Image: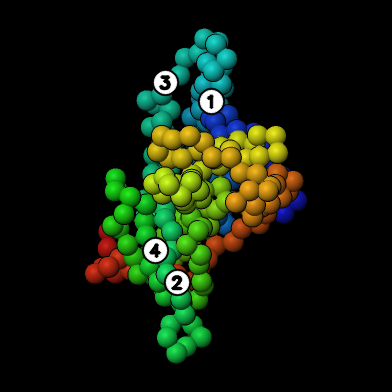
Amino acid sequence: MPNTAAFKNLAHRSAGPLWAMIKQCVPLIGKRGVLTKQLIALLDDSSLPQIDDWVSAIANSKHGKQAEVDYLTFLGIVGNYLAKIFEHCQLGVFEGVTPKRFGRGPFTGIFRSFKGASRTFITVYEYEGGSSFSNADVYLVDPAQHVGLCLSPLYVWGLGPPDEDTDLFEFDTPRKDRFSFKAVQFRREQLISSDGSYQEIWEILNQMRECDIPSSLSEGLKLEMYGFDADTTE
């Protein structure tokens, strides 16, 4: 999305700013969005005015104002659309991606899905394709469509101190000259600064606060679950 600054308006990760970003970005992406087509249908849903009212009511409730939100219906509507988007998708990281032996390509490695309660995450796909991946970046992949979308630096794997269990961190809010990340599991927030250990993350986020950075899909990814073909497995 050239010449836009949608991310700059995400002052904090809460219902109002997130909903506003969806309503701004989805029309710009349109049908080109391989992984977001269902959001077009959500914005065309007859319940859109009611969703707007509920999102506003959630914001009011945070400021001590009386608000009535039918959370069951609200989450049911939005959740059903999101479930369709992510039905065949996996969130995780690539590991050990290297060129095939005695060749200039393709690359091979594994993709470890963040699925399950265990930190070892046993849902693993064998990867083969023309792209190399860092194990520091978090990806959303669709094995059936052979595509992947990098979610970093908004999502970062292993951002916490080395003496803590590895966890998934997501961007939360800017804090003056730093950026706050919250872990998926309950633990203290992690702050990213321009002169710290994660300077590269800070620089990208700081650039994104000025102007949105184009992001493209990684295509032609062959992902097969160990012992199963991703194209034929439900």
Instruction: Mark 4 and mark 3 in contact? Answer it, CB < 8 Å.
Output: no
Residue type highlighted by circle 2: Val
Q: Which label's residue is closer to the chain start, 4 or 3?
A: 3
Q: Which residue is mark 4?
A: 111
> Between disc 2 and disc 4, whose residue precedes?
2
Q: Please indicate, yes or no, whether residue 162 appears anywhere in the rendered image.
A: yes
User: Which is more foreground, mark 2 or mark 1?
Assistant: 2
Q: Earlier in the sequence, mark 4 or mark 1?
A: 1
Query: In the rendered view, does 230 fall on the left or right side of 202?
Result: left
Q: Amino acid at mark 1?
A: Val
Q: Disc 2 to disc 1, how far (Cα)? A: 42 Å
Q: Which mark is residue 156?
A: none
- Residue matched to label 3: 70
Q: Nearer the viewer, residue 17 or 25?
A: 17
Q: Disc 4 versus disc 3: distance between alpha carbons? A: 38 Å
Q: Is residue 133 above or below residue 78?
A: below
Callout 4 crowding tier (Cα within 10 Å): few <14, some 14–19, many ≥20: many
